[in-house]
Amino acid sequence: MIVAFGESGWQWINPPREWAADDGLSLLCDPGTDLWRQTHYGYTYDSAHQFGRIVAGDLRLTATFTGEYAEQYDQAGVVLRIDEHTWIKAGVELVDGSLQFSTVVTRQASDWSVLPLGRAAGSVTVEAERVGDAVTVRYGLDGGRPRTMARLAYFPPGQAVLAGVMAAAPAGKGFPARFTELRVTAG
């Protein structure tokens, strides 16, 4: 188990070749990584870098991060993952040359929504709160509390999840991302 953010019990799914857990988590996304399932594109990728802890029941996941987004679909944010068929990711993604707040909810097939950020943010804080059968996703820019609601989604209750952060570089040559805060609180 990995010690990071002052706690033990962290683990990787698809660790990047380059990463460090020091006073945060820094990683260089490997090229060709993604987290997507079927819808519209007809392919399934489960290669995104995912770092988290296993938590059962209700939880609050909060992460603050930055990224050097350069290529189409470069992305970083939070992830709640039951298995390869059931997960939610939410964060910043470069889409058609603009930074978007992106949320993907996957229950057998992926469903994607984006909100334009309107400007480059120094850092983004994302909160995913799981209560019963729902996850509420909120975000804030440049150190602001996550107050802007982006999504309320059904998520199967009663199943343990990997709660943490993710990053991927589907189309580019990879990019650096840095997570300066990561908290997972049960209950």
Image (spheres, grey):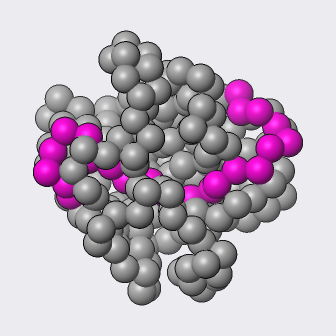
Q: In percent of the image, x 51 and y 52: which residue is there?
A: 78
Q: Position of residue 166 (x, y in %)?
A: 44, 54
Compare residues 10 and 5 and report the one nearer the observer: 10
Residue at the spot 70% in from the left edge and 60% down from the top edge: 54
Residue 85: where, in percent of width, then height? Answer: 60, 32
Does the stretch in magenta take in 170? yes
Question: Between 66 and 174, which is closer to the camera in this rendering?
Answer: 174
The location of residue 2, given as percent across then percent down, is 56, 79
Q: Which residues are magenta?
A: 154-175
Of the 4 image quadrants, the one containing the N terminus is bottom right
- Tell me if 175 is positioned left or right of 147 in this view: left
Q: Residue at x 19, y 54 (%)?
A: 174
Q: Residue at x 77, y 50 (%)?
A: 160
Residue 113 lies in quadrant: top left
Residue 26 in percent (x, y) is at: 34, 73
* Residue 85 visible to an observer of this rendering: yes
Which part of the image, by quadrant, shows the C terminus?
A: bottom right
